[in-house]
């Protein structure tokens, strides 16, 4: 017979580790599980692991092709779209440059701050991207601007699963073309 002695402290650490693994696994499932991402509020909620209730719909989910071709700026703290505008060839070029300059996956747990903006830019025609970071046909991107960190981009794959990336394209020209005061 073998007697195993485990101290209470080691047992507590083991239990905490198991709980942490379970919570992380659940969080990953929530992020990458089969979720409806047709509007920003569900997308924000999903990526925040349901930590923060979002007060309103960010994107009006419509089947109107005109809505699908417009740029929308969503204020995260207000919980609503604060500006809509038609896309232009120059803005399409900015979106393609952002996609081309992806440098890797965003590794922080919560990509959405309490304050900031999400800019939805449709990509027309859809862009087939295949590189070390992404293999998808992209028809829209979501650029996330915050006060303290460089912008990041959220891309939905063909099954609407979200992936958040870092990129190194300078967004000064994009902000200028959007003609919007990004006041944090």
Image: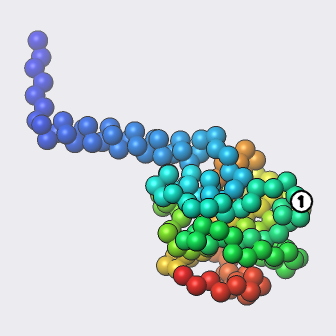
Assess disc 1: are there few (<14), some (14-19) or many (≥20) residues with their C-alpha within 10 Å of its C-alpha: few
Residue found at the very far top of the displayed protein? 1
Q: State the image quarter where residue 69 is shown.
A: bottom right
Q: Nearer the viewer, residue 108 or 101?
A: 108
Q: Is residue 99 above or below residue 7?
A: below
- Using the image as rendered, state which of residue 141 and residue 165 is in the foreground: 141
- What residue is at 58 percent from the left and 58 percent from the top? 44
Q: Quadrant of the C terminus?
A: bottom right
**On the image, numbered disc 1 is attached to which residue?**
65
**Looking at the picture, does residue 163 appear above or below residue 172?**
above
- Left or right, 112 with respect to 17, comes to right
**Quick one: quadrant of the N terminus?**
top left
Percent x, y for residue 35?
A: 64, 44
Identify the element where label 1 is drawn. Answer: helix
**Location of residue 157 in the rendering, given as x and y in whole percent from the top left corner:** 72, 50
Above or below, 29 against 46 in this view is: above
**Occupied quadrant, residue 106:** bottom right
Which residue lies most toward the front here? 55
Residue at 50% x, 68% y is: 113
Q: Nearer the viewer, residue 59 or 98?
A: 59
**Who's the residue at 76% across and 52% down the image?**
136
């Amino acid at each position: 017979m073998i007697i195993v002695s485990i101290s209470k402290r080691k047992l507590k650490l083991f239990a905490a580790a198991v709980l942490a693994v379970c919570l992380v696994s659940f969080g990953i499932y929530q992020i990458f599980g089969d979720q409806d991402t047709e509007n920003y509020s569900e997308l924000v909620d999903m990526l925040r692991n349901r930590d923060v209730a979002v007060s309103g719909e960010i994107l009006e989910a419509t089947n109107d092709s005109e809505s699908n071709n417009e740029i929308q700026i969503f204020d995260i703290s207000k919980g609503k779209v604060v500006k809509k505008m038609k896309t232009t060839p120059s803005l399409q070029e900015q979106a393609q440059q952002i996609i081309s300059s992806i440098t890797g996956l965003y590794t922080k747990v919560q990509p959405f701050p309490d304050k900031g903006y999400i800019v939805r830019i449709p990509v027309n025609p859809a862009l087939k991207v295949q590189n070390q970071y992404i293999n998808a046909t992209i028809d829209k991107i979501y650029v996330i601007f915050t006060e303290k960190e460089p912008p990041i981009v959220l891309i939905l794959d063909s099954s609407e699963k979200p992936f958040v990336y870092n990129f190194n394209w300078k967004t000064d020209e994009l902000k200028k073309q959007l003609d919007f005061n990004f006041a944090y």
